[in-house]
Image (spheres, helix red, strand yellow):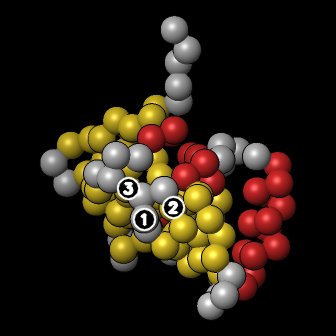
Amino acid sequence: MEKLPILLMPEKTGYILLKFSDLAYAKAEGAYVRIRTAGGESALLTGKLKQLESILYGAAFFRCHHSSLVNLHFVKKIKTDDGVWLLLMEGEAVPVSREKRKGLMERMYRL
């Protein structure tokens, strides 16, 4: 049986165990991070987005905005008509900052 990397993240009432492959995206909310899973579940974690980004470094995750970290395997479409947005399989739309656009395309080609 193949072992997948597991993320152990603190929340207000304990810890969440999450496979990296199940994490669709994360969004900063002040001193917390809101995560969304492949199944559409949501959890509010304590900590900073930068901490989560450092844990997920090297995986298929990309910091597309100062407040957003996306699992590129969940990107269904890149919308470019009104700014750049990542449309995810769950129907979420995540903005891409101007500074991150070139890096996004480079990462997408390497997947």
Q: Label 3: which residue?
A: 36
Residue 102 horizontal/vertical position (percent):
82, 73
The disc placed on residue 91 is 1
Disc 1 + disc 3, Cβ < 8 Å: no
Disc 2 + disc 1, Cβ < 8 Å: yes
Q: Quadrant of residue 31?
A: bottom left
Q: How many marks?
A: 3
The disc placed on residue 68 is none
Secondary structure of residue under mark 3 = strand
Q: Earlier in the sequence, mark 1 or mark 3?
A: 3
Q: Is residue 66 visible?
A: no
Say which amino acid is labelled 2: Leu
Please tell me which residue lies in front, 57 or 110: 110
Q: Residue at x 66, y 87 (%)?
A: 81
Q: Give the distance between the C-alpha atoms of the residues marked 2 and 1, in whole angstroms.
A: 5 Å
Q: Residue at x 38, y 63 (%)?
A: 33
Q: Is residue 110 left or right of residue 62?
A: right
Q: Is residue 95 left or right of residue 36?
A: right
Q: Residues within 10 Å of mark 1 (few under 14, many from 20)?
A: few
Residue 68 horizontal/vertical position (percent):
52, 69
Q: Earlier in the sequence, mark 3 or mark 2?
A: 3
Of the two numbered discs 3 and 2 in the rendering, the one whose residue sits closer to the viewer? 2
Q: Residue at x 70, y 44 (%)?
A: 58
Q: Residue at x 74, y 66 (%)?
A: 104
Q: Give the distance between the C-alpha atoms of the residues marked 1 and 3, in whole angstroms.
A: 12 Å
Q: Quadrant of residue 27?
A: bottom left
Secondary structure of residue under mark 2 = strand
Q: Label 2: which residue?
A: 88
Most extreme residue toward the left, as rendered? 13
Q: Is residue 12 visible?
A: yes
